[in-house]
Amino acid sequence: MVAVEDKIYTFSTTNIYIYDTSLNTWKTLTSSVSIPNSASRVSAIGHDGYIYILFDSSFYKYNPVDNS
């Protein structure tokens, strides 16, 4: 789970769940980041409007503005 601006993001193997704190609503997107079921540890941090995701030996930079 990671916060960027007024939203909280959680990741699953196929989806991204976004909680908008200002609207008190949840939204589900199909993830552009493929996290395998076998991933033992997933870490994420928000910085400068991006979310950086690390799992196993893979690293992704996720742009929440355009889901890429």
Image (cartoon, rainbow, N blue to C red):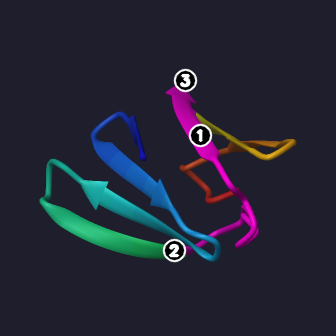
Q: Which residue is drawn at 55% across and 50% down?
A: 64
Asked if the magenta segment contains residue 4, the reply would be no
Report crowding for label 2: few under 14, some 14 to 19, many 20 or more residues within 10 A (C-alpha): few
Element under disc 3: strand
Which amino acid does the dot numbered 2 rest on? Leu
Q: Distance between the residues labelled 1 and 3?
A: 13 Å
Residue pushed farthest right?
A: 57
Q: Where is residue 26 in the image (x, y as percent from the top left)?
A: 27, 69
Mark drawn on residue 43: 1
Q: Where is residue 48 in the image (x, y as percent from the top left)?
A: 55, 22
- Disc with the residue nearer the chain's start (3 vs 2): 2
Task: From the image, tell me which residue sits under label 2.
Answer: 29
Q: Which residue is drawn at 35% across and 72% down?
A: 27
Which amino acid does the dot numbered 3 rest on? His
Q: How far apart are marks 3 and 2 (CA)?
A: 21 Å
Element under disc 1: strand
Element under disc 2: strand
Which amino acid does the dot numbered 1 rest on? Ser
Could you tell whether 21 is left or right of 4 in the image?
Answer: left
